[in-house]
Image (cartoon, coloured by chain):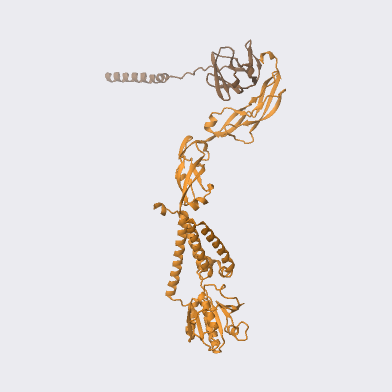
Chain colours: A orange, B brown
């Protein structure tokens, strides 16, 4: 239980960030069909996981295929809705704001226009969308993008105008589209006085949160449709009030509370979903894996050097959820032993859990070996004479009387304990075979053991000058 | 009054004796005498050679064939101020193999040490000539080859 709640700050940040991303997606796409399809995909994903865990392999494959197709469908079918969500908002509202529409709608102009049209018995259909996109519901009409004015509205619905039969879409203070064809409602309980305009208005209201104003051509009556509710408008103040309410003005405290509550619930649902997902990933079915990880020695004193170690790597038995273990690559595991508190010589270091660095959600079950013997020393400098390592056989008739080595001494750097035992550096083997007269040779120096090196890397070889002469007392050399 | 002068005279006598004794006491402090350290023998000749004949090195060299069977280190000192000791320390690749103690007698002295060679002795060697105070006088480097 303790381990269950042992969540590091990284994990909390992980959950919070992803919750916010999910919440923002909800805020941006709420009311659109994209969100519904995304929710459906989420449900399918859960089904797929359940099917997979139950061993229903084919089902899980099919689910996976459906999800992949659904993702493609979202992009292709709802591209207009996605682009409208992404295009119409600046970065601040994209990352932070809670979008509301119709805030700048000049309600007075609309009311005046509607009453003017009604008085003249000019049929009209006006759509004021709110948050839900309707690009995939309506058939696009003619793009208008004109500033809203009374004259403009009346002229659009004037009987001789080619686009007067369709709906005019009003967003803010602009008429964005005209001649838009709305989906017709299939309700059978509608009054007989309702014509095609009314049926179209109700059809759109059934699928979106838009407000639709209908002006009857026959009777000159005004009808307002919103959220499946139909209002017969007899008073301009009522129309104005409903429009202002729709536009976001005159919001009551109750409305604010309701909106805040909805967002809070959405945020809570996002948090629950992400937390559940995190736990399902990080605390799911526990899997155990073994890794051989090389030991890294960390030194605070740059002079300290590890000469030898009883183990160059340790075998770690780690556990975690299956997805985390699967995603774990060996280079994300580090075993670091600190040699700061060691003394020159042999030291036994404990390889504890604190020495092991693992990604979050993965824990160490065992470490083998748990103790490592390391030989630590401080490098020193020492000037050491160089001697030639002759091999082979010098001609019996010759005698080598002198060898001059240049330089005679080399400064080497190495651990003090190693340098203590080194009094001479020897060259790599130099052959005596074939020497018939005095000469010069360049010979490399054998720096053994490997823990020593020349202070000046260029001085890794020497020049040797040798002198040979004919043997006078050949008889002394036993063949 | 006589008694006073008598006491006074005794006081002065004592004071003079005491005062006169101070330099003597200082003079009695032991003065460390300089220990006479004999000069070390002076090395005039040091050679690795194939043989010694008539107390002289034969075929001085730096490379010796293992087939020789034995190799010699010859040293000559002049002057030798008093009877003293030097050491011939034989190393095969930094490992001490032999430490030969040689006694030198005045006024001059030559002495040598030798090493029996075995097949495993091939490689670089050195002989360190060290005096009785462990001071390194000279190092002779040579090789044993096929």
Up the image or down, A397 lies above or below A178; here it is above
Observer able to see residue A262 = yes
Q: Residue furthest top?
A: B54
Marker count (numbered): 0
| Residue A195 rendering spot, x and y as whole percentages | 54, 84
Up the image or down, A190 lies above or below A132; here it is below
Q: Nearer the viewer, residue A82 or A250?
A: A82
| Residue A46 rendering spot, x and y as whole percentages | 48, 61
Q: Nearer the viewer, residue A222 or A426?
A: A222
Quadrant, the C terminus of chain A? top right
| Residue A266 rendering spot, x and y as whole percentages | 46, 66
| Residue B29 rendering spot, x and y as whole percentages | 42, 20
Q: Nearer the viewer, residue A452 or B111?
A: A452
Observer able to see residue A21 = no
Up the image or down, A390 lies above or below B83; here it is below
Q: Nearer the viewer, residue A383 or A353?
A: A353
A363 to the left or right of A122: left
Residue A176 in which image quadrant: bottom right
């Amino acid at each position: 239980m303790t381990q269950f709640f042992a969540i590091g700050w990284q994990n909390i940040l992980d959950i919070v960030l992803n919750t916010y991303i999910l919440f923002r997606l909800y805020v941006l796409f709420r009311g659109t069909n994209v969100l519904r399809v995304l929710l459906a995909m989420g449900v399918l994903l859960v089904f797929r996981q359940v099917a997979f865990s139950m061993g229903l392999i084919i089902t899980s494959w099919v689910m996976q295929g459906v999800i992949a197709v659904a993702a493609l469908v979202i992009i292709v079918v709802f591209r207009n809705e996605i682009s409208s969500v992404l295009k119409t908002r600046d970065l601040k509202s994209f990352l932070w704001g809670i979008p509301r529409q119709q805030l700048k709608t000049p309600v007075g102009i609309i009311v005046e226009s509607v009453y003017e049209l009604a008085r003249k018995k000019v049929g009209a259909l006006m759509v004021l969308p709110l948050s839900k996109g309707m690009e995939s519901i309506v058939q696009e009409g003619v793009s208008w993008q004109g500033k809203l004015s009374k004259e403009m509205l009346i002229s659009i619905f004037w009987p001789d105008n080619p686009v007067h039969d369709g709906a005019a879409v009003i967003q803010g203070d602009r008429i964005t589209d005209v001649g838009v064809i709305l989906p017709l409602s299939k309700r059978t309980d509608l009054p007989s006085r309702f014509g095609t305009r009314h049926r179209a208005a109700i059809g759109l209201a059934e699928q979106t949160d838009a407000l639709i104003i209908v002006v009857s051509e026959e009777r000159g009556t005004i009808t307002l449709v919103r959220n499946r509710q139909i209002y017969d408008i007899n008073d301009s103040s009522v129309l104005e009030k409903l429009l202002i309410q729709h536009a976001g003005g005159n919001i009551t405290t109750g409305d604010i509370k309701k909106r805040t509550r909805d967002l809070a619930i959405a945020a809570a649902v996002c948090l629950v979903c992400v937390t559940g997902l995190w736990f399902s990933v990080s605390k799911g079915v526990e899997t155990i894996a073994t890794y051989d990880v090389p030991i890294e020695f960390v030194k605070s004193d740059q002079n300290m050097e590890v000469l030898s170690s009883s183990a160059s790597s340790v075998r770690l038995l780690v556990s975690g959820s299956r997805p985390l273990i699967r995603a774990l690559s060996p280079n994300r595991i580090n075993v670091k032993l600190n040699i700061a508190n060691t003394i020159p010589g042999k030291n036994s270091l404990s390889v504890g859990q604190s020495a092991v660095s693992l990604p979050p959600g993965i824990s160490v079950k065992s470490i083998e070996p748990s103790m490592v013997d390391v030989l630590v020393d401080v490098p020193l400098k020492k000037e050491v004479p160089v001697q030639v390592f002759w091999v082979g056989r010098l001609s019996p008739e010759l005698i080598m009387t002198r060898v001059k080595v240049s330089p005679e001494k080399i400064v080497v750097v190495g651990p003090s304990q190693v340098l203590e035992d080194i009094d001479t550096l020897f060259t790599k083997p130099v052959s005596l075979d074939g020497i018939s007269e005095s000469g010069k040779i360049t010979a490399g120096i054998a720096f053994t053991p490997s823990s020593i090196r020349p202070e000046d890397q260029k001085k890794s070889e020497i020049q040797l000058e040798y002198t040979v002469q004919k043997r006078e007392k050949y008889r002394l050399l036993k063949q | 009054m006589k008694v006073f002068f008598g006491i006074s005279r005794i006081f002065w006598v004592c004071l003079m004796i005491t005062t006169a004794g101070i330099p003597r006491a200082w003079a009695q402090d032991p003065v460390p005498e300089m220990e006479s350290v004999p000069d070390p023998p002076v090395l005039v000749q040091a050679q690795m050679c194939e043989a010694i004949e008539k107390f002289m090195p034969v075929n001085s060299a730096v490379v010796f064939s293992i087939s020789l069977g034995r190799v010699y280190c010859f040293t000559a000192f002049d002057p030798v101020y008093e009877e003293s000791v030097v050491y011939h320390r034989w190393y095969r690749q930094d490992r001490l193999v032999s430490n030969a103690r040689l006694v030198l007698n005045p006024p001059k002295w030559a002495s040598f040490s030798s090493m029996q060679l075995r097949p495993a002795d091939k490689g670089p060697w050195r002989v360190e000539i060290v005096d009785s105070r462990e001071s390194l006088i000279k190092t002779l480097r040579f090789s044993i080859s096929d």
